[in-house]
Amino acid sequence: MQTEQLIISLIKDDLINHKLVSGLNRLGLNASDYHLHLSETIFRLMGIDTYAEDEKLQDRYIELTSTVEHVDLTKITGRTIMLDTLVRNIYNELFRRKP
């Protein structure tokens, strides 16, 4: 598997996990400890130093991943297209903005 495909797959998994954890939190369950923290791996694979001056980029990633809350993952039609589009947009923005 190419690195780009791996990163895209990890972003997609991170979005699905974010949606699940957020939904559980909204139901009153404290699921915050169950985030996968895939962003660290994604950033490392992209050559982005997660502890340096890239804090703004990390904040932007978190902001972008939160938009998955507006995607209805239960609808079969369009779900893959919407999710894949969001994943690709996040990947492209990280790629453009990486140092």
Image: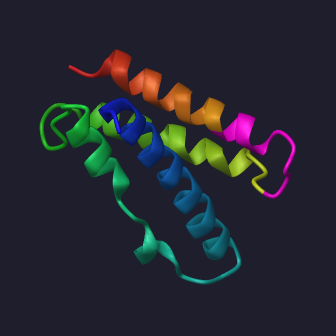
Residue furthest out toward the left:
52
In the rendered view of the protein, which quadrant contains the N terminus?
A: top left
Colour mapping: rainbow
**How many labels sit on residues?**
0
Most foreground residue, 18 or 10: 10
The correct choice, above or below, for 27 with respect to 54 in the image is below
Residue at the (72%, 42%) spot, across then down:
80
Q: Position of residue 37 (x, y in %)?
A: 35, 59
Residue at the (48%, 53%) spot, across then down:
14
- Please give the range of residues in magenta: 74-83
In the rendered view of the protein, which quadrant contains the C terminus?
A: top left
Most foreground residue, 28 or 10: 10
In this image, 80 relative to 76: left or right? Answer: left
Residue at the (45%, 21%) spot, across then down:
92
Most foreground residue, 26 or 10: 10
Check residue 80 for magenta coloring: yes
In this image, 19 relative to 47: left or right? Answer: right
Instruction: Report which quarter residue 94 is drawn in.
Output: top left
Q: Position of residue 35 (x, y in %)?
A: 43, 67
